[in-house]
Image (cartoon, grey):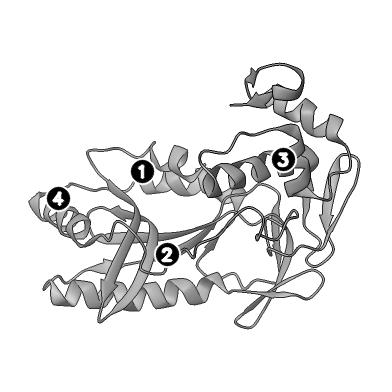
């Protein structure tokens, strides 16, 4: 959603770098999207949180009072590290970071108005106003973009995947928001008993299939495999129906799998 909105910015006025992973003084950090234009540049922290949350000074909570990482702390840290990168490159640059909540089902209560937060209902207007800003790109802007791309780390140093097998991994659906295994099954919706987050059963099944494909690229996706992986989905027929709807069926009867 964020990419669709930012793609509407005038390419003659703006340069956009996505998923930048940078390092300074042996410290790594990531910027979801960095918008370069005349004057102020805009690092963007993008969140896809769903459900109801509330704000207390310097803290974010779910409605059942579970604390989650504060996105405002993330942009403060990223801003500090990004300025260090610019100082080493002898760039004198103004930046203004914001946290973008892009999920239309997200609500945050009690947040102060002055915080650099943009809500789903504000995104279209924000990009329209940004696009209306006067901006003329020059060689320095393209040079800055090239320098940042050169500094980009293709893979995260924190990605150290241990050896694993299907048998030794814990099975069961996890909450897409807080990663808890405490999922309460329902006919059409699953509810997280930890944070209260909700997810459609079909979406949860498809998310589980993507997990399996990521962890085991060569594995054949079958109804029984997904049933065993999900645990809380009690109906093989429901899983089979979702797989048939979203994937291509290969084979028949006991040799059926989906791609």
- Report the Cα–Cα distance between label 2 and label 3: 26 Å
For marks 1 and 4, give the one nearer the viewer.
4
Q: Badge 1 is on which residue?
A: 131
Which element carries disc 1, helix, strand or loop? helix
First of labels 1, 4 by sequence position: 1
Are the residues tagged 1 and 3 within 8 Å (C-beta)?
no
Residue neighbourhood size for the residue with mark 4, other residues' Cα within 10 Å, grouped as few (<14), some (14–19), many (≥20) = some
For marks 1 and 3, give the one nearer the viewer.
3
What residue is drawn where x is 38% and y is 72%? 78
Indicate which disc residue 225 carries.
3
Which element carries disc 2, helix, strand or loop? loop
Indicate which disc residue 142 carries.
4
- Report the Cα–Cα distance between label 1 and label 3: 48 Å
Are the residues tagged 1 and 4 within 8 Å (C-beta)?
no
- Report the Cα–Cα distance between label 2 and label 4: 30 Å
Q: Badge 2 is on which residue?
A: 159
Expressed as whole percent of the image width and height from the top left, the position of residue 40 reads: 28, 62
């Amino acid at each position: 959603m964020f990419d669709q909105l930012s793609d509407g910015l005038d390419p003659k006025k703006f340069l956009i770098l996505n998923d930048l992973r940078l390092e300074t003084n042996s410290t790594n950090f990531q910027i979801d999207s960095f918008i370069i234009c005349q004057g102020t540049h805009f690092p963007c922290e993008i969140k896809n949180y769903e459900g109801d949350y509330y704000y207390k000074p310097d803290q974010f909570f779910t409605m059942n009072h579970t604390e989650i990482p504060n996105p405002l702390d993330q942009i403060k840290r990223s801003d500090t590290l990004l300025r260090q990168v610019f100082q080493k490159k002898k760039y004198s640059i103004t930046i203004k970071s914001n946290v973008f909540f892009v999920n239309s089902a997200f609500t945050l209560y009690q947040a102060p108005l002055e915080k650099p937060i943009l809500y789903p209902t504000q995104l279209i207007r924000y990009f329209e106003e940004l696009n209306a800003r006067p901006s003329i790109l020059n060689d320095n802007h393209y040079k800055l973009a090239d320098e940042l791309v050169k500094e980009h780390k293709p893979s995260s140093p924190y990605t150290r995947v241990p050896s694993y097998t299907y048998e030794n991994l814990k099975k069961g659906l996890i909450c897409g928001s807080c990663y808890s295994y405490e999922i309460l099954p329902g006919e059409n919706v699953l509810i997280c008993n930890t944070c209260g987050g909700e997810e459609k059963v079909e979406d949860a099944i498809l998310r589980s299939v993507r997990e399996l494909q990521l962890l085991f690229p060569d594995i054949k996706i079958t109804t029984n495999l997904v049933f065993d992986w999900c645990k809380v989905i009690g109906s093989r027929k429901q899983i089979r129906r979702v797989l048939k709807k979203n994937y291509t069926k290969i084979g028949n009867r006991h040799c059926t799998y989906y791609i």
